[in-house]
Image: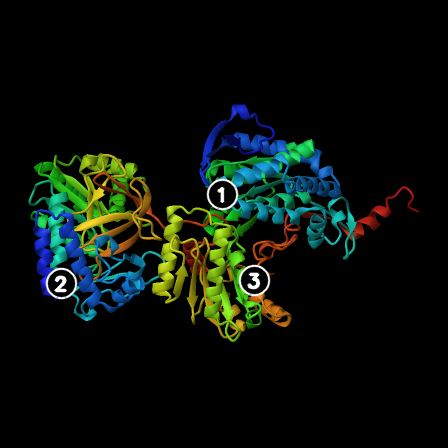
Amino acid sequence: MAERACHLPGLNPDALQWETLRFDQAGRDISVQVPVLTTADMGAMAAHVRAHTGQYLAQYPVARVIDIIDRAIARLLDRTDPYRRRMEDLLPAITGYDREMLRLGLTEYLKSFRKPELKRFLAEDFPNPAILDDFQPLPKGGYGRAFGPEVLAHIWAGNVPGLPLWSLVSGLLVKSGTIGKVPSAEPMFATWFAELLAEIEPELADCIAIAWWKGGTEEAETALLSEADVAFAFGGNEALAEIQSRAPITTRFLAYGHKVSFSLIGREALDAAKASATAKLAAYDVARYDQQGCYSPHVIFVEAGGGAAPRQFAQYLAHELAALERKFPRRPLSISEAASIAAWRNAEEISAGADVVGDADGAWSVSFLESADGFGPSGLNRTVRVVAVDDLASVPARAAPYKRLLQTVGIAAAPERLFLLSEALGAAGVTRIAALGDMTAPEAGWHHDGRYNLSDLVRIVEIDGRAQAAADRLAPYAD
Amino acid sequence: MNQDVIVSGLLDFISADGADDAAFNDMALTLFAYQFENNAPFQKFARARGKTPRTVKSWTDIPAVPINAFKTMDLTCTPIAEAEAVFMTSGTTLGSVRGKSYHPVLDVYDASMRRNFRDRFMGGRDRMRMDILFPSPALMPNSSLAHYLNLAAKDFGLHGSGHLVCARGIEFSRLYENLAEAERTGAPYALLGASFSLVHVLDEMARIGHRVQLPPGSRILDTGGFKGQSRELEPDEFYDGLAEAFGVPRSHCINMYGMTELSSQFYDHGNAACPSVKSGPHWLRARVVNPLTGASVPDGETGVLAHTDLAHFNICTTILTEDAGIAVDGGFQLLGRAAGNAAQGCSMAIDEFLKAAGAA
């Protein structure tokens, strides 16, 4: 069957050229058609989105936007809904992730975009969300009103299903017109979401565009960036630098680069009653989306002196990863991914001097280092390094040299230490502390990479406090 | 068994007309036992994989040493200090640690090079007028490629053959003189060098609008890829460029695939069509394997190349490369670097981490 990716308001699909992307994982063969857009197409589409957003979406009260998103999410949570069924049917074949892992992951993920969570999302960035609807008093005096960008560009990357939803929802909440570029690795999720929104509120059909071009294609990208008021871009640093070089200085550029995350396990989580449960949570963080997320752990620091020694914990972890492989098998690897794992295993063993255990086909690998500096990247796809430490307090200093690359730390430790460690980790560059097992499921309204998701997007328009007094003097009822 | 016996056995092996499976296997197992006995780090590596001379019965069971291990393991059966030559990887890739191959004597390396080069490059001639687009061994004493190319010029070059890269770079005026001289005499001429140097030459010749028509029988040898030292060209673009600039048909443009971690080289039969099919001499065999299991992949499937080079007697016979390849009739096609892809998601892959950490 052939799906068509993209949602192109203002363009005639029959007048466009289409290319075909093939996906053949999970024993399926799926073709997805994607449009080839010219600079002129992009300009026309941006003008269309800009005009219609001004006419419709920008005029909605924020409560109505929340309501529309909530209705879309409710449909996606309903396993009998046609869109949800397509997601469950096609995403495993497109991404290669295990069907059941995807199904569970989708539900858990979508739950963080329901009405109560969306309100929390807004409250996180705007003490008074009504500032998105009209002028509200500011604490310093005067009045303020937040305007979202007329055109917000999204350049997504990667195959982690649903990832575009974060920025899509962010844009909608501030009433922005959207032009998103889907990655070749997973072009459908954003397309379906746009179509679903258009079904729920037909006016939105003209306020959201979902496009595609081959990553790094200059023409379409430059056209989009020159049309956008604000641009979200995701990807590796090199790709981001290239995208940024195409954005005019007047386009606000919000880059989300690739990140590394890690875990800390305190001795209090390693007594006889807790150790294997702790290992299970740690393994889940590693296995979920096969470590492709910025929040996925690459290294697990384990404190000595608990009921289970660090080496023993590494064995528990290996056991849990083996169990997870039976339950949620890892996606099939390309030869280059397999070669990366082989290279990582060899480097761990030969260069770092680690003990490496793993299943023969490379479904998972755990390397154990008794003593070392310890911080480093994994080979991805369920490969993780366990490092023994005498005291977790020594870890933040080891991570600090990589400040710009850090994101989430999963911690299993008692409350007092949770805060002490968080303080030091935050200073070292980490932006999110999570419970073990929750690393790959950020909560609604989280500050992605330490930034404000919504307030970074808007323009605050102020009425200077003295303007009201000056206006008073001109009132027809002035004395 | 001592080194002298190994070396003389190998010299006989290389000079023979060929070797059947049994002969190749016998020599490979002999060398495995020799290395296992005389190189403690290698023995440890093999034992950790359950491979000993007692359990290994086929050359395909010899554990493949990943090329990364050449950076940290002392792979040698004789003391490092007594090596006649130490060849090192270029170290232009990430990290400054260089992979090393220790050669206690170069007799086998040189015999392997000569026999194979004569068969695969010389086109039936004993000597040709040659120019080398690479520094001499005096400038790069630890470069196996410098040694290889120097040997080519010395043992297969006519009088006047030599190096056209000095400390200041490529000597274009000498190159143009030599090319003009070859055109004048009508005798076949060979230009050999790093692929990226040839790109520099192509770029410079294009800039000044220079072209030559080398005499029939002339040949070009390139090796090593572009390594970020020149523009990256698609193979077809590269060989079209060479054919056009030098008047040497693509069928006479030979690519040599060699590595510091080997003592022998692979060649193709010209690049009329790309990717070309590469193969080695009777003492060098390539397999296409699953890098995680080490098992051969079914024919026609992409895998990672593992090479068994009997001439690499002092170090290890079998290495696991980071090159992707596919087995085809008559050899294999080289498909570029296997590892080092970016993550599929927003997680950081190793290469990217090292790059970003270096810049941080």
From the top left corner, tell me how far across and down residue B280 is, in percent.
Answer: 18, 47
For residue A343, the mark is none
Query: Mark 2, chain letter?
Result: B
Could you tell whether B280 is left or right of B358 in the image? Answer: left
Nearer to us: label 1 or label 2: 1
- Whether label 3 touches label 2, CB < 8 Å: no
Q: At 65% from the left edge and 49% from the top edge, which residue is drawn? A: A112
Mark 2: few/some/many CA within 10 Å (<14, 14-19, 20+): some
Q: At 93% from the left edge and 47% from the top edge, which residue is drawn? A: A479
Amino acid type, label 1:
Thr
Residue at numbered disc 2 = B105
Regarding residue B311, the answer to whether it shows in the image is no
Residue at numbered disc 3 = A410
From the top left corner, tell me how far across and down residue B268 is, in percent.
Answer: 20, 42
Q: At 10% from the left edge and 39% from the top edge, which residue is drawn? A: B188
From the top left corner, tell me how far across and down residue A7 is, in percent.
Answer: 58, 33
Residue at numbered disc 1 = A95
Could you tell whether B257 is left or right of A339 in the image? Answer: left
